[in-house]
Image (cartoon, helix red, strand yellow):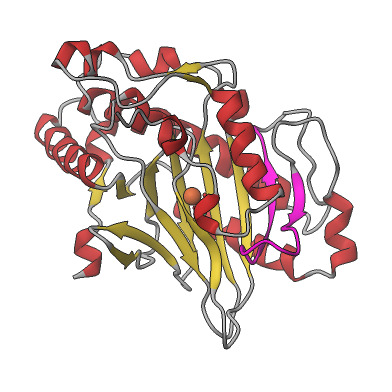
Amino acid sequence: MAEALIPTVDLSPFFSEDDVDGKKKAMEIITKACSEHGFFQIVNHGVPVDLLQRALELSRIFFDYQSEEKLKSSAPSDAPIRTGYNTRPQQSPDKNEYLLMFPPGSSFNVFPQNPPQFKQVLEGVFSKLTKTAALVERIVNQCLGLPTNFLREFNHDRSWDFMVALRYFPATESENNGLTQHEDGNCLSFVFQDDAGGLQVRMDGEWIPVIPTKGTIVVNLGDVIQVLSNKKFKSATHRVVRPKGRSRYSLAFFHNLQGDKWVEPLPHFTKGMGKPPKYRGFRFSEYQQLRVRNKTHPPTRPEDQIGITHYEITS
Ligand SMILES: O=C(O)CCC(=O)C(=O)O
Ligand SMILES: [Fe+2]
């Protein structure tokens, strides 16, 4: 039942010229999912499944090293988000550690020397996911009825996409929060989780677990798409719950937006539909900074974290 609530979309029709029906069917499912919750899963997405599995295996090896070894790939940097190996502040409710990278070749990247193939495999996954994200963005563009290539042209700078390999610590007797309930701030995100599961989606007031299925990538829309579309498409609310007795590993990829970009509801969804804008405009970098602060200085009450409601027009 729960699985059926999170629709799975076969992307193979988009890799062939003439499967018009297959494309149409996929777009219907995506349109419905994005209008309701902003969450769906994809298969036949163009990323080799064994490459994704390998990345998780190497992650597991890396995060099992002693702190001293992991900290060798931790570096303060001028990047808008800290790259390399990071832990959460002590007071953070998010009980995980992670390795963050910008696109292969970015001068901000810091990779571990060990395990030896880790860098190469992460870079390989990144490149493949970049292509899949461009495809999903194109499909979302079409589902929204925007002019061809609108989102691609609006969001043309790929330098700020990033990927995180995460390790969540086992739950304790009293506490199992892995990642506090949130919406992603970017355009769209991909998650590949190991068989421990733990990713949960908010649907109609309930938390629905995303059951891990081999080779399936979870897609969620972020706040940028929600604002541009004046809330026609939703930014998915999700969280991670830690399993008992074992760590959980995942990869999260963020198809991002360049910081200087001005984000506001597009006329297509406001004037064009006779509707008032639901958000005031903002510079993306400003929103990103507020969100980074949520992480570096977590508020005492999780509900005080800044999210997209900060820009909502309420009256
Ligand atoms: O690790 C996961 O499964 C989800 C990660 C996530 O939602 C995020 O980093 O924004
Ligand atoms: Fe997220």
Q: Position of residue 307 (x, y in %)?
A: 48, 41
Identify which residue, 199 or 7, lies in the foreground.
199
Q: Which residues are magenta?
A: 84-103
Q: Position of residue 33 (x, y in %)?
A: 22, 45
Residue 87 in picture, x, y percent from top left: 75, 58
Frontmost residue, 72 versus 56 = 72
In percent of width and height, residue 223 lies at: 42, 35
**Residue 260 is one of the magenta-drawn residues:** no
- Residue 160 horizontal side relative to residue 137, left or right: right
Query: Taking 145 as reference, is 307 above or below it?
Result: below
Please report the residue visible at 64 percent of the width from the left and 33 percent of the height from the top: 289
Q: Is residue 17 above or below residue 128?
A: above
Say which of 205 and 186 sits in front.
205
Instruction: Return the residue found at the far front.
Output: 315
- Kindly tell me whether residue 228 is visible in this rendering: yes
Tell me the residue at 74%/71% (across/down): 64
Q: Which quarter shows the N terminus?
A: bottom left
Where residue 205 sits, quadrant-wise, is: bottom left
Q: Which residue ends up furthest to the bottom in the rendered image? A: 173
Towards the viewer: 209 or 99: 209
Residue at screen point 52% across, 39% down = 254
Residue 222 versus residue 201 in the image, above or below? above
